Amino acid sequence: MSQRIDAARNVMTELAVHLLLLEIDADSARIVAMMDETALRRRSRGPYSQENLPSEAMEMVDWVKLHLYHSPERPGFLVEAGGPWPALLLRFPHSGVLVRYVVPEAAPPVYVAPPGEWDLTGLVLRALEMLSHSLRAVAARFGGEPPLTLSLSYPDNPAYEAERARSSAPDRVVPVLPTLDIDRSGFSAEQRAVHDAALRAATYEKWFERLGRTGFTMNTGGARIRDAGG
């Protein structure tokens, strides 16, 4: 699983994605991202055909090829033009990463930072890195990684008002807290204990809090890893 997480992180970093949704499991890493603003300067209108492909998607194909020029893995491209809004699907066959680029009108109902404000993707990448390292600690102890799944959500930031009051630029404080919700139901008690210890060490014991009997929540600096537990 750590390899899948790292593969998703690498793709998101190389493509500088504006992340909207993320799901990772044993089968694949599935990313939904906003098309780059350069691809949205000229908008297309359907109906689409082989002779009239959406310009947004075709601009993104060129954009992706440029950014992955030195990458050892090249994706396959699929232009989605059968619905009301065009999209572009990238499939990385070796690493199992899929990226679906959408236009703003087709973006899922999640928080999107206003133009010019902080993109939250970097905060999520940092949380993914910490999660990957912690899973490797479990693998080093037990000879392999137990099954884990994760999904990205954007719950309200419980410290939003307090952070605005402390900030010299309150309008730039983000009202949500990007959260990696993980499922460790396939872990044994011993594996959870080692995993918890690795995560606590990553935050110097400061921001790890127990949830219920087996869960936890951990702030990673602008984002959060959470296991609702039981």
Image: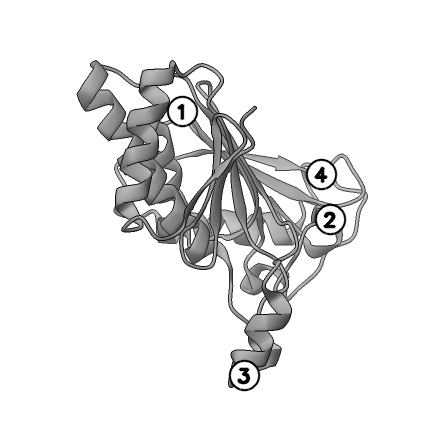
Residue placed under numbered mark 3 in the picture:
169
Q: Is residue 50 left or right of residue 11?
A: right
Q: Nearer the viewer, mark 4 or mark 3?
A: 3
Q: Which numbered tag is attached to residue 93?
A: 1
Which residue is outermost to the bottom?
Answer: 168
Q: Are there few (<14), some (14-19), or many (20+) residues within 10 Å of tag 3? A: few
Task: Tell me which residue sits at (44%, 56%) in the image.
Answer: 123
Give the residue displayed 61% in from the left and 79% down from the top: 171
Q: Is residue 142 above or below residue 45?
A: above
Mark 3: amino acid: Ala
Tell me the crowding category of disc 4: few under 14, some 14 to 19, or many 20 or more residues within 10 angstroms, Cα based.
some
Front one among 34 and 110: 110
Q: Nearer the viewer, residue 16 or 68?
A: 16
User: Which sits earlier in the primary sequence, circle 4 or circle 3?
Assistant: 4
Q: Disc 1 marks which amino acid?
A: Pro
In the image, residue 88 above or below residue 155: above
Q: CA distance from mark 4 to mark 3?
A: 41 Å
Q: Disc 2 designates what residue?
A: 109
Dot 2: within a 10 Å radius of its alpha carbon, few (fewer than 14), some, or many (20 or more) residues? few
The percent position of residue 62, horizontal first and vertical second, equals 46, 51
